[in-house]
Image: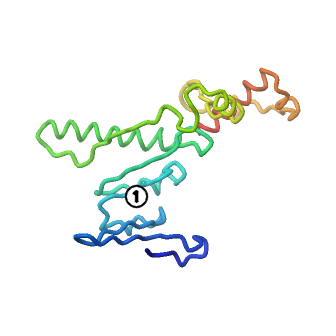
Amino acid sequence: LVQSTNPEFNKAVVRVNIFHDHRQTIQYIHPGDAGKLSQAELVVIDEAAAIPLPLVKDLLGPYLVFMASTINGYEGTGRSLSLKLLDQLRQQSNRLGVTANDGGVAARTLHECELKESIRYRSGDNVETWLNSLLCLEANTPHLGGGTPLPGDCNLYYINRDTLFSYHSASEEFLHRIMALFVAS
């Protein structure tokens, strides 16, 4: 076991060396240190949505990559991960699949697994429903069309804080729409 000398890591274990038939190393690296992965066989990226997208892309290499992330929920929102990176990986995997079917070799395939049922609560639990509503965690954006309007076509409104948090159904709907915009941006 190797502990970090970085005071920010509070002596956390950053490397485990295992000796069986040969040496194998499990090591934590900072997401910005993708250049240190040249000898990696497997890279595990936990909570990938919390890492800036360019750094996640840098971590993808010729080795096997396992990415786990929270797409929706109070742990964080991974909209750029789900909207941008996963779409790109799906397209690359589809192109490579076509190439492999034509006799070529597919360099990387994408396998997606999705947890649809909460592991914290049973399905349809009232606490989970209340928490999601309270924190606007399931705020979904309606299709807004393409592009952004010109500044002259926009309006700026003053919103009274007391009105916004009055628990009125119209205020609640407005809050959900605002959160949906934040989640989608």
Residue identified by numbered label 1: 59
Q: Quadrant of residue 89?
A: top left
* 84 w.r.t. 134: above or below: below
- Per the image, label 1 sits on a secondary structure element best described as helix
User: Could you tell me which residue is drawn at 11 percent across and 40 percent down?
Assistant: 103
Depth check: give the residue in front, 117 or 100: 117
Under mark 1, the amino acid is: Leu
**Which residue is more in the foreground, 77 or 131?**
131
Left or right, 42 with respect to 130, comes to left
- The relative height of residue 71 versus residue 9 in the rendered view (above or below) is above
Q: Where is residue 18 shown, x and y percent of the image?
A: 33, 70
- Residue 167: quarter of image: top right
- State the residue at coordinates (28%, 36%): 94
Disc tally is 1
Q: Position of residue 26 (x, y in %)?
A: 38, 66
The residue sitting at 39% across, 38% down in the picture is: 113
Structural crowding at the residue carrying mark 1, measured as other residues with C-alpha within 10 Å and reported as few (<14), some (14–19) or many (≥20): many
Residue 132 appears at what percent x and percent y? 65, 32
Q: Position of residue 180 (x, y in %)?
A: 63, 32
In which quadrant of the rendered image does the N terminus lie? bottom left
Q: How is the image coloured?
A: rainbow
Q: Which residue appears farthest toward the top when viewing the image?
A: 169
Residue at the outermost bottom position: 5
Foreground pick, 81 / 145: 81
Q: Identify the image quadrant of residue 152.
A: top right
In the image, residue 83 above or below residue 39: above
